[in-house]
Image (cartoon, rainbow, N blue to C red):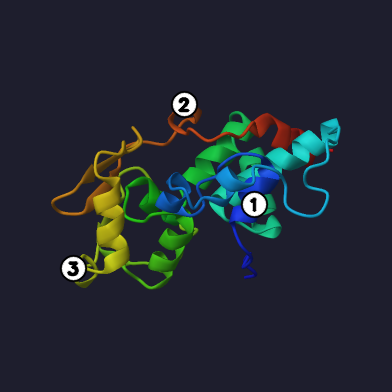
Amino acid sequence: MARYVEAVCRNCRREGLKLYLKGDRCLTAKCAFDKRAYPPGVHGQRRTKISEYGRQLREKQKAKRIYGMPEKQFRIYYRRSDQMKGITGENLIGMLEKRLDNVIFRLGLAASRNQARQLVLHRHFRVNGQRLNIPSYQVKVGDVVTVNDKSKEIVPIKSAIESGTGKEVPAWLTFDLKDMKGVVERVPVREDVHIPVTEQLIVELYSK
C-alpha cells in the first residue's frame, strides 16, 4: 500500500497546526511548524479565502494525516461508519481510534502513530497472546495488548515509555507499566478523543 514518504512536517504546516506526527520532536525547538507556521510552497504566505468545500477538504486531509492513512483506505472507513448505527462522524473517529497502531500509540508504547505502525509490522506486539502484524486490526472490548518479551528492551519502545511517563492514557484503555500490558476496557466515544478535527465536515464532504 502506498504511503506518504515526504517530510511529514509539511503536513502540519499545510493544515496550520501541529499534528504531532514526529512525537517528542514536535515539542522541541527543531519543530518546523514553530519556525515556519505557514503552508509550504512559494505561495504559502499568501492570504487566501477558503470556500466551504475547502474547509471540508482540509478536515478530511487533517484526519487522514493524523492517523497516517491513504485516501482509498480512509474512504473505506467512512463507508463502513456510514453503515453502522449511530452518528457517522463519531463512528468514523471510533473506528480510527480502534486501529491497533493507534492503540499502541495511545498506550505510550510508541512515540508516534507512524512508529507504532512500523513496530506492529515487525511483530513486536501480541493481541490476546497472538502475534499480529496488521496495523489496521480493529481491537475489541476485552482485548489484551502486550509487548513481546524480547521486544521490551528495544530502543523505540523503551524511549517512548521513558518520554511518555506521566502522560494520560485514554479512559477507554488501561495500561500496566510493569507488565507492559494494555487492556481495551470499552469502545471509545468522541469525548475520549482529543484531536482537532470536525468530523461532521468530513461527512458532508463524502455525502456530496
Which disc, if any, is residue 149? 3
Tell me: 181 left or right of 99.
left
**Residue visible at 70% across and 56% down in the picture:** 71
Mark closest to the chain's N terminus, 3 or 2:
3
The kind of secondary structure element at disc 1 is helix
Looking at the rendered image, the quarter that the C terminus falls into is: top right
The kind of secondary structure element at disc 3 is helix
Classify 10 Å Cα crowding around label 2: few (below 14), some (14-19), many (20 and above): few
Front position among marks 1 and 2: 1
Which amino acid type is marked by label 2?
Glu
Which residue is denoted by mark 1 in the rendering? 11
**Residue visible at 76% across and 36% down in the picture:** 56
Mark closest to the chain's N terminus, 1 or 3:
1
Residue 18, how many percent across, how many down? 56, 42
Looking at the rendered image, the quarter that the N terminus falls into is: bottom right
Residue 51 visible (yes or no): yes
Q: CA distance from mark 1 to mark 3?
A: 35 Å
**Residue visible at 50% across and 29% down in the picture:** 190
Which disc, if any, is residue 191? 2
